[in-house]
Image (cartoon, helix red, strand yellow):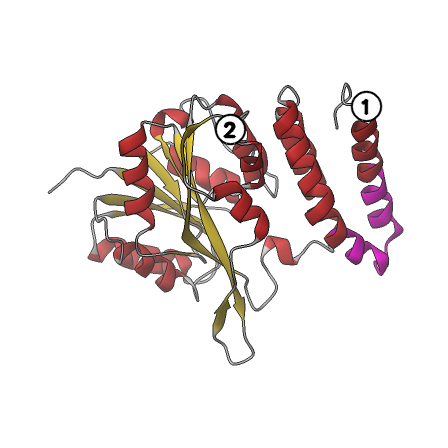
């Protein structure tokens, strides 16, 4: 049997309805030399059992069961500790890879020698009849990934800072020698994404859709809970931390800051307008004020 080229880390917490599609999307890959570490983050539903059943049927799957819920960052870190392959990727257990995702991403890195590759993604939105409608690639994703680029640096492609997710990338394993996800926080992949860009010798982008990101019908996805004060705090802290990583990279810093102004703040203002707790508006205004201050004096940072 061919040695696996990539470890795909698949964390899951109480996502049993979606696990079969996620794992099937791995089995359907046109490139089959992968292994997957399935991390059950203390689920109380059948997620862990579905992971175990997959491992019993296909030895490319390995299961890690965490006895209590520790969060997405800790679950991903548990998978990273088990990586022995040249490449690393991520797939949340409620999302799906497109069939050629690994072929395109690993193949690109094998040709270019870059540290990592960034691909595009779409959203799967729930319909009333229980099906899902796939949306188009959003403009900020297009800006980050198209056209295809090989061996670029952050100074050459600052719009790459708009790709703030872990799961639309494949990286060389050495990228994670000293890098881990923050634990106990939401939006844990944002600061990691910016650290990857800042430290990269070179990276690639491909416009291919590699992941379909599912919006859950029960509204339990993190981005569907932004009216919660705790979620808002972690969201704002993650954006600020990501900007801090980019502080010495002016073009990238401004690209990321401008995208926050264009994409994140209008959405959060809409929630704040009718929020019953004035703290929500106060937190958002304070963050906006810091961004506006930076916009007029780039010697200060958020």
* Residue 73 visible in image: yes
Residue closest to the eye, 262 or 91:
262
The disc placed on residue 233 is: none
Q: Residue furthest left?
A: 1
Residue 239 image-quadrant placement: top right
Point out the tag, 2 or 1, that comes first from the N-terminus. Answer: 2
Question: Looking at the picture, how far across and down is residue 60, in whole percent?
Answer: 23, 47
Name above or below for residue 294 compared with residue 97.
above
Where is mark 1, residue-wise? 297
Residue closest to the eye, 89 or 117:
117
Main SS, magenta region, reads helix
Q: Secondary structure at mark 2?
A: helix
Residue at image point 54% right, 70% down: 126
Question: Looking at the picture, how far across and down is residue 9, in whole percent?
Answer: 38, 43
Is 276 magenta? The answer is: yes
- Quadrant where the N terminus is found in the figure: top left
């Amino acid at each position: 049997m061919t040695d696996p080229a990539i470890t795909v880390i698949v964390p899951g917490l109480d996502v049993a309805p979606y696990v079969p599609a996620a794992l099937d999307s791995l089995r359907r890959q046109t490139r089959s030399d992968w292994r997957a570490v399935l991390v059950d983050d203390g689920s109380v539903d059948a997620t862990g059992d579905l992971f175990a059943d997959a491992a019993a049927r296909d030895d490319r799957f390995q299961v890690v069961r965490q006895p209590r819920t520790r969060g997405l960052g800790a679950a991903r870190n548990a998978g990273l500790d088990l990586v022995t392959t040249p490449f690393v990727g991520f797939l949340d257990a409620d999302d799906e890879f497109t069939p050629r995702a690994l072929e395109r991403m690993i193949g690109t890195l094998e040709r270019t020698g870059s540290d990592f590759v960034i691909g595009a993604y779409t959203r799967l939105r729930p319909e009333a009849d229980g099906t899902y409608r796939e949306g188009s690639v959003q403009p900020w994703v297009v800006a980050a990934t198209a056209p295809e680029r090989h061996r670029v640096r952050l100074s050459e492609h600052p719009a790459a800072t708009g790709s703030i997710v872990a799961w639309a990338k494949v990286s060389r394993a050495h990228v994670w020698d000293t890098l881990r996800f923050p634990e106990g926080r939401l939006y844990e992949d944002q600061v990691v994404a910016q650290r990857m860009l800042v430290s990269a010798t070179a990276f690639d982008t491909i416009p291919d859709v590699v992941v379909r990101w599912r919006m859950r019908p029960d509204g339990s996805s993190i981005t569907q809970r932004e009216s919660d004060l705790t979620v808002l705090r972690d969201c704002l802290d993650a954006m600020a931390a990501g900007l801090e990583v980019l502080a010495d990279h002016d073009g990238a810093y401004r690209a990321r800051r401008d995208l926050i102004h264009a994409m994140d703040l209008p959405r959060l203002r809409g929630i704040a307008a009718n929020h019953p707790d004035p703290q929500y508006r106060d937190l958002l205004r304070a963050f906006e004020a810091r961004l506006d201050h930076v916009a007029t004096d780039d010697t200060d940072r958020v």
